Image: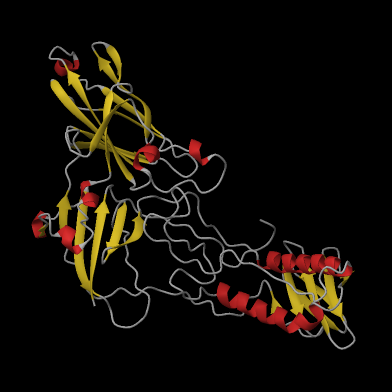
Amino acid sequence: MDSTVKTSNQTRTINPKYGQKPGLAGILNLVVLFLIGLQKIWHFQSQGLYRNGGSYINYYMYHGGTNFGRTAGGPFIATSYDYDAPIDEFGLPREPKWGHLRDLHKAIKLCEPVLVAVDPTVTSLGSNQEAHVFRSKSVCAAFLANYDTKYSVKVTFGNGQYDLPPWSISILPDCKTAVYNTARPGAQSSQMTMIPVSSSFSWQSYNEETASADDDDTTTMNGLWEQINVTRDATDYLWYLTDVKIDDDEGFLKSGQSPLLTIFSAGHVLHVFINDQLAGTVFGGLSSPKLKFSQNVKLTAGINKISLLSVAVGLPNVGLHFETWNAGVLGPVTLKNLNSGTRDLSRQKWSYKIGLKGESLSLHTVSGSASVEWVEGSLLAQKQPLTWYKTTFDAPYGNDPLALDMSSMGKGQMWINGQNIGRHWPGYIAQGSCGDCNYAGTF
């Protein structure tokens, strides 16, 4: 099957560093919550509200899945909605977590007849150990718990002894045989690997020009406007365009001390172009999306063009008053080291252009891509802003999941056969580190 890939790349490439969550943390917490849930059910049963009994556990997330297009879990959150879930975004089991939960379900299912029939009896087995015993006339099930976060213990229960690792629960469906322990995965621990497909891409590129205030689809207003209110989330991109006139007698033209351009933005990413040349890129983060660009810029006598490309990376996903969560260049925007001192550009006329030219031309489609001239080979653009790339490839045979490794790219979006499969930004480095996985203790 012939497939087409197109990407839009806006920033430099930085070595990626990804974080992941502990694979088995919280299994004991899950069992404890299950027991607490049963106790609540029994409380209602005693009042006649639940005549038939029963229990229910909701997982979040069990199948991570993938968001497509520009939908994501929030600002600076990857398009993937995986959450290190038991079933990954490709629909494949993530071991050993998936198998460990499967075994948990099997163990609880074995206990089902007595779990929903009788009240539990809780007895102490030690200073931090206890047994939850469910016993009817014909069946018996027990949960042996060790709440100590550091030490393993051997407890005596009934006619047997049982080793309990730190912070773990063993399940005995017949009150004799431990078929499951939350801290001892019995599932396979091998990890899935992605195998590179032995085919090379032949890329073509197209470079956009920076937007101009003279373009037909621009709007001119006084002052700086909030990005989402202008774009209505039709695109991640909004151009802020203005001109600065520099007189011939400006001192910096002779001294060589370029003016200092300072821009404050509510986020999330900002590309600054001076006279169509990229001056720099800055971006915020999840904890603090606001950003500041402050750099000496080269201006010449006459009219100078300042083009600011503001990029939003997801909408607010949690909290109050989303209408107060801003994005875009809200200012102030100032120029320092002029004869007059500091010039505030915030209140002058600004022109606004929604989206990129490539978006309006639908370069991600076959018909749209035919409307411009692409280059390849030695002319291929590399590490340049406002660049679109396209290629074709034959999909491998079979039904195995297919992934695209974007680690060599910067920031942008990707389309396959005209479908937007999401943003990519391997240059955004995750904060913190994984460290050693430790399932013990609450979290």
Let me know if residue 256 appears in the view. Answer: no
Let me know if residue 220 appears in the view.
Answer: yes
Residue at 24% from the left image edge and 78% from the top image edge:
1
Indicate whether 398 appears above or below 36. below
Q: Residue at x 42, y 49 (%)?
A: 314
Which quarter of the rendering shows the C terminus? bottom right
Q: What percent of the width, then of the height, locates residue 37?
A: 76, 66
Looking at the rendering, which quadrant does residue 185 occupy?
bottom right
Coordinates of residue 402 in the picture (x, y in percent)? 34, 73
Q: Quadrant of residue 195?
A: bottom left
Q: Position of residue 164 (x, y in %)?
A: 75, 73
Figure check: 350 above or below 385: above
| Figure quadrant of residue 240 | top left
Q: Is residue 86 left or right of residue 32?
A: left
- As displayed, is residue 12 above or below residue 109? above
Q: Is residue 49 above or below residue 307?
A: below
Q: Residue at x 41, y 35 (%)?
A: 266
Describe residue 233's horizontal placement relative to residue 165 as left or right.
left
Label count reads: 0
Front-lying residue, 186 or 373: 373
